[in-house]
Image (tube, rainbow, N blue to C red):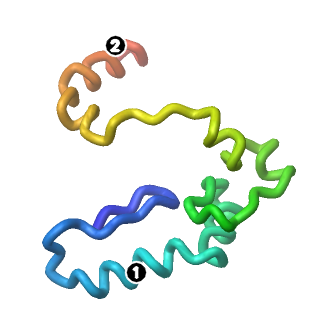
Amino acid sequence: MLIYAADVAPVRSAPHARRAQEFCNRILRAGVQVQLMEKALLGPTNATVKVAKQLAEAGVPDAELVKRSFFVAPNFFTENRQAYTREVDFTIGM
């Protein structure tokens, strides 16, 4: 199972696929997404969860920000990991 902040997905061929999916469903519930948003300032993945103005001003991504965002292909970093790591190290002065 892969969990990153408010995003969650079961791993293909998981040994306990049903339980992994149940866990994902639980994390994506509106109530859990609200808790993640309020306590960890994570943008909700569940589209039914609205971001309060105060939290949006604090940097929690709301639906409008997500519409204006662009997304990198999921395999970009795995396919370019070495070059990406080298660039990050150079940028932060390592």
Labels in figure, total:
2
SS category of the residue bearing label 1: helix
SS category of the residue bearing label 2: helix
Q: Residue at x 14, y 80 (%)?
A: 15
Q: Position of residue 64 (x, y in %)?
A: 71, 42
User: Dot 1: within a 10 Å radius of its alpha carbon, few (fewer than 14), some, or many (20 or more) residues?
Assistant: some
The numbered mark at residue 70 is: none
The numbered mark at residue 90 is: 2
- 48 vs 19, left or right, is right
Query: On screen, 78 above or below 54?
Result: above
Nearer to us: label 2 or label 1: 1
- 82 vs 65, left or right, is left
The image quadrant that residue 44 belongs to is bottom right
Q: CA distance from mark 2 to mark 1?
A: 39 Å
Q: Position of residue 89 (x, y in %)?
A: 32, 20
Q: Position of residue 16 (x, y in %)?
A: 20, 84
Q: Position of residue 14 (x, y in %)?
A: 18, 75
Q: Residue at x 39, y 33 (%)?
A: 72
Could you tell me the amino acid type at mark 2? Phe
